[in-house]
Image (spheres, helix red, strand yellow):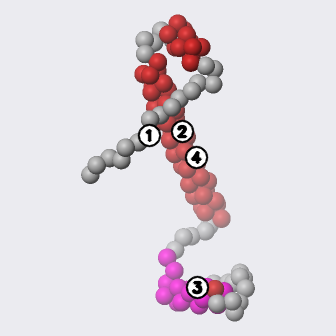
């Protein structure tokens, strides 16, 4: 499978290229600006992915805590409940009923 041709990446530092080169070479003692930028982008991507995973994990932990604390159970609906839900949804979609909360 051929890879689609991607457009070139254009990066214009907000501090100006000369200032960025000066900082990277003189303060960080890097020899190549492109390598420095590439490493910075990789580090940022890894950090963002890790943060998203941590937030997702925290959300799952909170959900698990709430379920355990309130004694809630997750279950797969049986045929009877499936039919009831389908019937209610069909009525709502058909305009014969408005959304309502119903006891199961």
Residue at 69 percent of width and 92 percent of height: 96
Q: Which residues are magenta?
A: 76-92
Indicate the quadrant containing the C terminus: top left, top right, bottom left or bottom right: bottom right
Residue at 65 percent of width and 65 percent of height: 70
Q: Quadrant of residue 20?
A: top right
Residue at image mark 1: 7
Give 61 or 92, whichever is nearer the viewer.
92
Residue 23 vs 58, above or below: the answer is above
Residue at 53 percent of width and 29 percent of height: 11
Disc with the residue nearer the chain's start (1 vs 3): 1
Helix, strand or loop under label 3: helix
Disc with the residue nearer the chain's start (1 vs 4): 1
Does the residue at mark 2 contact the one at mark 4 (Cβ under 8 Å)? no
Disc with the residue nearer the chain's start (2 vs 4): 2
Residue 7 vs 74, above or below: the answer is above
Residue at image mark 3: 85
Helix, strand or loop under label 4: helix
Q: Counting other residues with Cα less than 10 Å from the Cα at mark 3, is it few (<14), some (14-19), or many (20 or more)?
A: some
Where residue 48 is drawn, which disc sits there? 2
């Amino acid at each position: 499978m051929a890879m689609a041709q991607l457009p070139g990446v254009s990066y214009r530092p907000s501090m100006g290229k000369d200032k960025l080169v000066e900082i990277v070479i003189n303060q960080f003692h890097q020899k190549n600006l492109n390598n420095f930028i590439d490493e910075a982008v990789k580090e940022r991507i890894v950090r963002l992915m890790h943060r998203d995973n941590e937030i997702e994990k925290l959300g799952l932990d909170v959900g698990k805590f709430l379920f355990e604390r309130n004694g809630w159970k997750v279950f797969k609906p049986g045929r009877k409940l499936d039919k009831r839900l389908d019937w209610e949804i069909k009525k709502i979609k058909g305009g014969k009923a408005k959304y309502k909360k119903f006891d199961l």
